[in-house]
Image: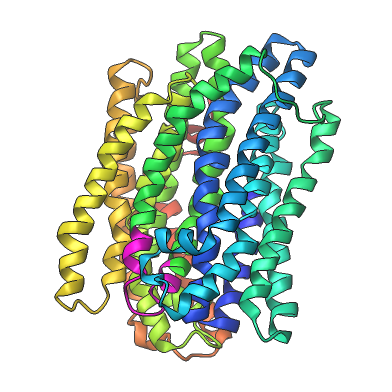
Amino acid sequence: MTLLSRVTGLVRDVVYAHLFGANLFMDAFLMAFRIPNFLRRITGEGAFSQAFVPVVAEYRLKGDPAATRRLVAGVTGRLGFVLFIVTAIGVIGAPVVIVLFAPGFGFDSPRHDLAVTMLRWTFPYIFFISLTALGGGVLNAFGKFGTAAFNPVLLNLVMIGFAAFIAPHFASPGLVLAVGVFVAGLVQLVAQFRGLARLGLLSWPRWSHAEEGVRRVGRLMLPGIFGSSVAQISLLIGSWVASFLMTGSISWMYFADRLVEFPMGVFSIALATVILPGLSAHHVEQSPARFSGTLDWALRLTTLVTVPATLGLVLLAGPLTATIYGHGHFVARDVLMGGYALMGASFGLLGYSLVKVLAPGYYARQDTRTPVRVGLIALGVTMAFNVFVVVPAWRAGFPAPHALLALSPGVGAYVNVWLLHRGLIQRGVLVPSSQWRALLSRQMPLANAAMAAFLWWSAGGWDGWTGQPALLQIGRLSICVLGGVGLYAGVLYLLGLRSRDLRAV
């Protein structure tokens, strides 16, 4: 289901690029959509999920359906009330919110009024999608992953429909896309109801003062909100700087980021979502060996998949951008600048993925404070990179400052990985298995080197990809990707890696 959501998401972005390109209108829409997404990642997918899922898993293991139902209803009531207030503030204060998130979209900017109009339609998405995340967290805690994983598909299908079939017939296509975001959020929320009803957990929200679990979720959320905010502030800083750069920078970075999120969403985020309830159960059952084994397995699998994915995105940045986006209104200059952005953004893929897997090692033990402290340090590194590298390069006339801006969060991500991993090791929570030695010393270095050499040889220069027929581009890119994957897997097999080495504990 997660794979399907990423495929349809890629189709959605291809429609955006082909029909609208990278221009003032697209920059404004993407910023208007980024703001509720920014808040969603803090509340819906960030602090809330990290605090809620372990508590729900604990209630489920205690076997008291009535208590679980009261917990869900109480949390829904409190979260819904807060979200309603936040949504109202965002809609009413949209002119100020736009400037806060994108100073380059100042009150005298031609993009300001356009972005404000769009934001008033997109901002309620935070209300719908955060409640959707609540329902998804309940389903995940009960081992029902399909419905929640399918929900992004609904978003993508609605947005494809609005972009391809409705927006072209209106004088203001950006406003139509913004309305599509509103409709998609409502559709995603309603789609959760059936799964919750089958578990007997669909009930009216209520404001609960007495339920201990509701208070505990609130206490766990506070540091989690701060921690998730730290992670998102680095992206917000990027938006601030990008709003001052040349027109198209926000769009180039968005399209590059979407390609990086494809492997991360298909694999890393999906894996992190699946292991969190299991780790929470191991912690409640006081089974440290199984806890460590599950976490170690997830880290090995993530490393094995995302290292070659990172190399592949960097080496095929130009061909990927040209083949996927480089048609219609997405012209040759957009391909070049988008390719540079993809190279920068791809650098952090391994770091982002490992953070997604390491963080549940803390959240499952209901420790939301340590990731906050680590995140603050990582944020400091990202900000320092922006101040001392990105800004000076931009002021000196570097032709693609947005590429450095896309790279900066990855630098902080690797610092985050190092500190999270070290903390789990020092506490004895994670005990690395003996399989790491062969994997890191012999198998992966040789397999990645062979794959990288093949990709560099088969892809050739970027000029040979721009302006070519789509079928020719797809054929060449398929040879590069399938050949690289096959060579990587083949070398690993020759060096002794077998499927049994990748099985969960």
Left or right position of 175 against 444:
right
Left or right position of 234 against 278:
left
Which quadrant of the view contains residue 239? Answer: bottom left
Left or right position of 111 against 349:
right
Residue 214 point in image, percent of width and height: 63, 20
What's the coloring here? Answer: rainbow
Q: Residue at x 21, y 64 (%)?
A: 390
In the rendered image of this protein, does residue 319 appear above or below residue 428?
Answer: below
Which quadrant of the view contains residue 459? Answer: bottom left
In the rendered image of this protein, does residue 335 appear above or below residue 259?
Answer: below
Looking at this view, is 97 or 25 the one in front?
97
Residue 266 point in image, percent of width and height: 56, 50
Q: Residue at x 18, y 79 (%)?
A: 397
**Is residue 243 found inside the magenta-colored segment of the image?**
yes
Residue 436 visible? The answer is: yes
Residue 464 point in image, percent of width and height: 39, 87
Looking at this view, is 89 or 438 the one in front?
89
In the rendered image of this protein, does residue 326 appear above or below residue 31?
Answer: below
Q: Residue at x 42, y 70 (%)?
A: 250
Residue 295 visible? The answer is: no
Left or right position of 166 against 483:
right
Q: Residue at x 67, y 40 (%)?
A: 131
Chain part drawn in magenta = 238-253
Residue 169 point in image, percent of width and height: 73, 86
Total numbered labels: 0
Looking at this view, is 29 or 366 the one in front?
29
**Is residue 497 found inside the magenta-colored segment of the image?**
no
How would you classify the magenta stretch by its main secondary structure? helix
